[in-house]
Image: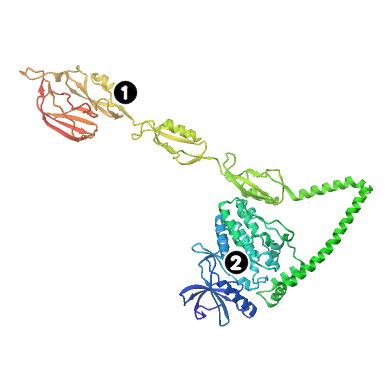
């Protein structure tokens, strides 16, 4: 471990250690020449003695330094100082994809696809330069703080000898391709396999092959089929699952042949998630599951048993994996010849047995056993079908998790295909399935589920407020909703029109739900009846029945009889709130006689002044009052008195003196006429 402050190459000052791997330690450092922070990877001491290793380390680092791409952690420099071999790289602040998956459990489809595309773009740039990464894994993928995905450690895995599996690189065995595990030749398709395993982990939160030892994991890469990721993520889109499965084919020829093809399918999967556009080469004889021989297994174990790249372990692995290609081909040819020879004997034996069976049937030798043999064959066939097929259970009413567990017990998988509304099944429960329950299917078959999204919903129509009650009820009925009505007092909305709705317009509700309409019934007021000419008692009774109060004053008028109402305030026809007091002016005989002498008059005085509409009148309600001899008399109270021209109604009085007329609009006194004269009649 380097101390803080040490300077490498007279340029890079070590600040702190930020990580450590099997082959090197990584330090945060300052580049004094360019005044920037960088990451410096320094080879561990145990590898410095191996000149071959050091030469490859430097060669591959220099090759990686040629790369410059937004999705690659760029290598700036490579050097040696006082026996320390180092690589200077871009310092990326962020989190590794491995830590990100651990933190989130599993990633969303959109997020996983975006990361895979960015990693693929970085790999494509490397492959175009003839550089194979050979150690693609979440630990070597960094997500920066600004969301950029970068692939790191180019050339480092290759420097350890790409054809070996030693204790130093077996931490990556979860992501190693079968040809890497087997010690075969690695190429761009090996990186694609490792990326496929990484995508598998992103969408499921787990690696497809795991075990107690690195050997057991390596053997699984060679011999076991990968479990479809939809087994663990039922709602995984079909297209992305097919992409992952194509990347992780054991046969290199069945994978994507270059990263460009992979990028194209990844982008298309975002537009067509359930599309069936991923094509895969047919299975050939050389694409079958690889069986590891005892000798190969021994070599793998020997390579793994060494600690930290001990010389003995490395030699054993190198002897196996660095064997010249010609020798390997000779070995394969020898094995092939041996296999053909043995196969020839087996085929010959089969032909002889068939001839014996045919001849025996011809001469009746096997006639007695034909029925029993046929029964045995049928039984065997039936047994075979039973072992290879299962009956699909009924998943109706189960949640997806429950259906997954039930399916896995029978060796099949499920995947959510679509969602539909349902009045029968709660949200998240299975409505239907394909194939149907009771169908016989092969093991590992995927059953597609239609899942309930809950009861069907309807949007409360807009534009109900302000419409008539009948129109609103018709709109709700057309939308599949039921209406109820409640009348409310409202002076701002016309009678019979909708004031508001509950739930509000635009709200999602279940089909058939009830929506309440609040409809205006206007105001709780009454129209003042015209009681002029009625006797006092009748007028009082009429007001009481309408919920109005009253008070009585006296006046005089020759137009009405004794005791009859001659004036009303508020005026007849005006709408007032219930409980309003109406002033009744009743004709009094005493008012009609004069107490004076010698005048020759009847004691009645009239003002015949004409009142024109004021220029600043705003159309409000009008009240006219006469103030005379300290007494106030209401002479008009109602709507616009000037609708038919000037107001010229005679104003009666029992006094010959002058008076003052006050005129109010909407309760505010606005006009005044003083010294209004009254003449005797």
Circle 1 packing at 10 Å, graded few (<14), some (14-19), many (20+), is few
Tell me where residue 498 appears, x and y as whole percent: 40, 34
Coloration of the structure image: rainbow
- In this orientation, does residue 563 appear? yes
Cβ–Cβ below 8 Å for labels 2 and 1? no
Q: Is residue 628 above or below residue 157?
A: above
- In this orientation, does residue 214 appear? no
Instruction: List the residue tagged with mark 2.
Output: 127
Tell me where residue 569 appears, x and y as whole percent: 23, 27
Q: Is 364 on the left-hand or right-hand side of 558?
A: right
Tell me where residue 486 sits by quadrant. Answer: top left
Instruction: List the residue tagged with mark 1.
Output: 545
SS at badge 1: helix
Q: Is 375 on the left-hand or right-hand side of 98?
A: right
Determine the residue positioned at 56% across, 44% down: 453
Determine the residue positioned at 91% across, 53% down: 356
Determine the residue positioned at 84% across, 64% down: 341
């Amino acid at each position: 471990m380097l101390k803080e402050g040490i300077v490498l190459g007279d340029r890079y000052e070590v600040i702190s250690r930020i990580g450590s791997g099997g082959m090197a330690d990584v330090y945060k450092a300052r580049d004094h020449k360019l005044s920037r922070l960088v990451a410096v990877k320094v080879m561990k001491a145990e590898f410095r003695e191996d000149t071959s290793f050091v030469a490859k380390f430097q060669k591959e680092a220099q090759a990686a330094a040629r790369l410059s791409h937004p999705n690659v952690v760029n290598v700036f420099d490579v050097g040696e100082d006082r026996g320390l071999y180092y690589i200077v790289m871009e310092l990326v602040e962020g989190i590794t994809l491995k830590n990100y998956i651990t933190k989130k459990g599993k990633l969303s489809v959109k997020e996983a696809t975006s990361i895979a595309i960015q990693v693929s773009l970085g790999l494509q740039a490397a492959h175009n330069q003839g550089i194979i990464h050979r150690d693609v894994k979440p630990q070597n993928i960094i997500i920066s703080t600004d969301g950029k995905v970068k692939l790191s450690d180019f050339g480092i895995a290759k420097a350890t000898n790409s054809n070996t599996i030693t204790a130093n690189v077996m931490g990556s065995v979860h992501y190693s391709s079968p040809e890497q595990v087997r010690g075969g030749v690695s190429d761009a398709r090996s990186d694609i396999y490792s990326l496929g395993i990484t995508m598998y982990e992103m969408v499921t939160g787990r690696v497809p092959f795991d075990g107690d030892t690195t050997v057991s994991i390596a053997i699984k890469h060679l011999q076991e089929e990968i479990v479809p990721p939809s087994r663990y993520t039922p709602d995984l889109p079909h297209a992305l699952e097919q992409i992952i499965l194509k990347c992780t084919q054991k046969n290199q020829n069945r994978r994507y042949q270059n990263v460009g093809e992979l990028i194209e399918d990844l982008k298309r999967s975002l537009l067509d998630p359930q599309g069936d556009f991923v094509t895969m080469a047919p299975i050939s004889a050389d694409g079958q599951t690889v069986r590891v021989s005892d000798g190969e297994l021994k070599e793998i174990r020997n390579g793994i048993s060494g600690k930290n790249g001990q010389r003995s372990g490395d030699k054993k692995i190198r002897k196996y994996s660095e064997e010249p290609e010609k020798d390997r081909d000779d070995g394969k040819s020898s094995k092939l010849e041996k296999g053909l020879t043995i196969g020839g004997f087996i085929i010959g034996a089969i032909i002889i047995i068939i001839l014996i069976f045919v001849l025996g049937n011809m001469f009746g030798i096997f006639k007695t056993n034909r029925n029993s043999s046929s029964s045995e064959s049928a039984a065997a066939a039936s047994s075979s079908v039973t072992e290879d097929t299962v009956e699909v259970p009924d998943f109706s009413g189960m949640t997806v998790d429950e259906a997954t567990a039930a399916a896995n017990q029978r060796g099949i998988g499920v995947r959510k295909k679509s969602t539909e509304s349902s009045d029968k099944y709660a949200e998240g429960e299975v409505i239907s399935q394909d194939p149907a329950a009771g169908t016989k299917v092969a093991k590992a078959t995927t059953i597609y589920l239609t899942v309930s999204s809950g009861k069907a919903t309807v949007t409360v129509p807009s534009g109900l407020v302000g419409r008539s009650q009948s129109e609103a009820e018709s709109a709700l009925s057309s939308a599949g909703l039921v209406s109820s009505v409640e009348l409310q007092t409202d002076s701002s909305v016309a009678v019979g029109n909708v004031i508001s709705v509950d739930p509000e317009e635009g709200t999602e509700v279940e089909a058939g739900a009830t929506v309440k309409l609040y409809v205006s019934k206007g105001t709780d007021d009454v129209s003042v009846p015209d009681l002029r000419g009625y006797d006092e008692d009748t007028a009082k009774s009429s007001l009481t029945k309408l919920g109005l109060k009253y008070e009585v004053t006296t006046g005089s008028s020759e137009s009405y009889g004794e005791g009859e109402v001659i004036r009303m305030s508020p005026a007849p026809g005006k709408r007032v709130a219930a409980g309003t007091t109406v002033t009744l002016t009743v004709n009094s005989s005493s008012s009609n006689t004069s107490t004076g002498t010698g005048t020759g008059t009847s004691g009645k005085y009239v003002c015949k002044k004409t009142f024109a509409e004021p220029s600043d009148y705003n159309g409000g309600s009008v009240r006219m009052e006469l103030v005379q001899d300290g007494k106030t008399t209401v002479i008009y109270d109602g709507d616009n008195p000037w609708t038919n021209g000037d107001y010229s109604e005679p104003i009666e009085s029992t006094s010959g003196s002058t008076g003052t007329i006050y005129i109010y609009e909407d309760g505010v006194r606005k006009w005044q006429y003083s010294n209004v004269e009254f003449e005797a009649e």
